[in-house]
Image (spheres, grey):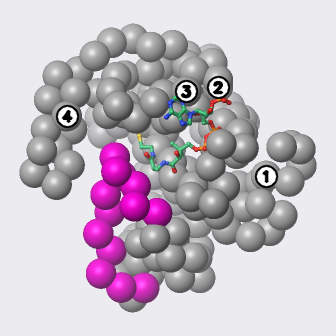
Amino acid sequence: MPRAAITIRPQMVKDAARFYKILTTGNFRFFPLNISSIEAEKRFLRNNVRNFKEKKTFNFSILLEGEVIGAIGLIPETGRNYNAEVGYFIDRRYHGQGITTEAVRLVEEYALSKLPFINRLQAIMVVENLPSARVVEKAGFKKEGLLHSYLCLEGHFHDVFIYGKIIR
Ligand SMILES: CC(C)(COP(=O)(O)OP(=O)(O)OC[C@H]1O[C@@H](n2cnc3c(N)ncnc32)[C@H](O)[C@@H]1OP(=O)(O)O)[C@@H](O)C(=O)NCCC(=O)NCCS
């Protein structure tokens, strides 16, 4: 994937219909977001836009040659904002092309140049979510441990791996 083709920018309310489509058709086993409507997604995005302005959370859209194909967020931990969690999803049609790995690299670049308070990036994923683990490994994160029953998805508790990368 040529680097120039992938860009990130802060999410916008106008991305709602694309996200709705991606999330409702993706059948993402370890990322079950039940969005009821495009309107509900717009409300979620308005909140993201406000939080970005207030420097609380940093949710980006991932674009391939200008088209929104996914999302990636940088969420500082409450009370310890020097740790920020990275989370992502991509339109199923574009999986396996290195796009998310490039997006993780781009948010790291953003944190390094614009968010001087962030010292550490981290990511968690259900142990069976091998593509997600592979993304952060390729982006230079280290596997630091296993958290038992850490994540509840649709009423079921899952073990997760935690990965970290110290960026400054
Ligand atoms: C996780 C996700 C974002 C990865 O996106 P992507 O753009 O396909 O990621 P990349 O192409 O950068 O890397 C994926 C890697 O996983 C590997 N992979 C894919 N399926 C795999 C599997 N079943 N077992 C092992 N590795 C697998 C790919 O081969 C690739 O590694 P490689 O470059 O060494 O070959 C995408 O699968 C997704 O949107 N999933 C649904 C949402 C989700 O689970 N988000 C993460 C929540 S923690």
Q: Are marks 3 and 1 in contact (CB under 8 Å)?
A: no
- The answer to which of marks 3 and 1 sits earlier in the sequence is 1
What is the crowding at mark 2: few (fewer than 14 residues within 10 Å), some, or many (at least 20)?
some
Nearer-N-terminus badge (2/4): 2
Instruction: Look at discs 3 and 1 and give the one toward the viewer.
Output: 3
Q: Cβ(mark 3) to ligand 1 < 8 Å?
A: yes
Q: CA distance from mark 3 to mark 2?
A: 9 Å
Q: Spatial distance from mark 3 to mark 1, Cα to Cα?
A: 19 Å
Q: Are marks 3 and 2 in contact (CB under 8 Å)?
A: no
- Rendering quadrant holding ligand 1: top right
What amino acid does circle 3 point to? Arg
Mark closest to the chain's N terminus, 3 or 2: 3
* Residue 158 numbered tag: 4
Q: Which mark is residue 151?
A: none
Dot 1 or dot 2: first in sequence order is 1
- Element class at badge 3: helix
In the picture, the disc for residue 6 is 1
User: x%, y% of residue 159?
Assistant: 22, 27
Q: Secondary structure at mark 1?
A: strand
Q: Which residue is mark 2?
A: 139
- Give, as a single range, the part of the protein colored magenta: 26-38
The residue at which mark 3 appears reads as 134
